[in-house]
Image (cartoon, grey):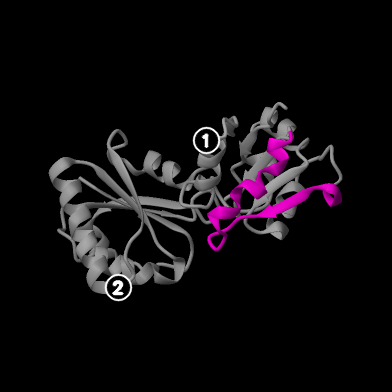
Amino acid sequence: MKKGKLYLIPTPISGTDFNSTLVHDDIEILSSLKSFIVETPKVARSFLASIKLKVPIQAIDMYVFDEHSSVENIQELIQPILKGEDMGLMTDAGTPCIADPGEEIVLMCHRLEIEVVPMIGPSSILLTLMASGLNGEQFTFNGYLPRKPIDRQRELRALAERALNKGISQIFIETPYRNQVLFEDILKLPENINLCLGIEVGGNGQKINTFPISQWRKRKSVLEKVPIIYIIGK
């Protein structure tokens, strides 16, 4: 039996309108899918409600896969694909598998020779890098930094060293309620390092600014508890 495909669907970073985040051809494909792997069914259904579906939304099957899910159950999740049906994979906000769940599912699909199709859509990480003015040819995404202050500060010093000595932009993120604590740790780095903050990128409150640490110290900014992308570079 011919296997279906797995479509990786970027979701709106802010808002619930697929029409503003996906290209027309991808919306056409999306509107025909009957099964989805999602983080939160309620959120996924609100996204789907923003486009004209060819399948009644009540008839769409939602399979949950989040940070608490077991990788041992992945083959059960993709049963529709194995039976020849296309499926969509989407997270609550942004691009699947990039600082969001999904890579284990994609890897399993490759092992089972299932075609994986990424759709075009927003990635706050890449959008921030594009607008940062920092090195976009050599960069590293480091995900979340350690929670413990001593470990976090040690990691920041290591990232700063790589940024200064090798010129490689260092990208990382943080849980919104720890933004200010992380920011204050970053301000302890050498003053000649550049810091870019991508605040609510893709949303109505979007702000992207790059300044040397010395200038950030003078600005005495207080960060809100919103999604922020951090980049330090030479």
Q: Is residue 129 left or right of residue 162?
A: right
Q: How far apart are marks 2 and 1 (CA)?
A: 37 Å
The residue beneath circle 2 is: 148
* Residue furthest left in the image: 165
Q: Is residue 152 above or below residue 115?
A: below
- Which region is colored magenta? 57-83
Going from the N terminus, do you reach mark 2 or mark 1 first? 1
Q: Is residue 204 among the parts visible in the rendering? A: no
Quarter holding residue 18: top right
- Is residue 91 on the magenta stretch? no
Q: At 45% across and 42% down in the image, what residue appears?
A: 127
Q: In this view, does 123 lie to the left or right of 169?
A: right
Q: At 60% across and 49% down in the image, what residue appears?
A: 74
Q: In this view, does 185 lie above or below 212?
A: below
Q: Name the disc covering residue 111, or none.
A: 1
Q: Where is residue 22 in the image (x, y as percent from the top left)?
A: 64, 37
Residue type at mark 2: give it: Lys
Residue type at mark 1: give it: Arg
Q: At 40% across and 62% down in the image, what residue appears?
A: 174
Label 2 environment density (alpha carbons within 10 Å; few <14, some 14–19, many ≥20): few
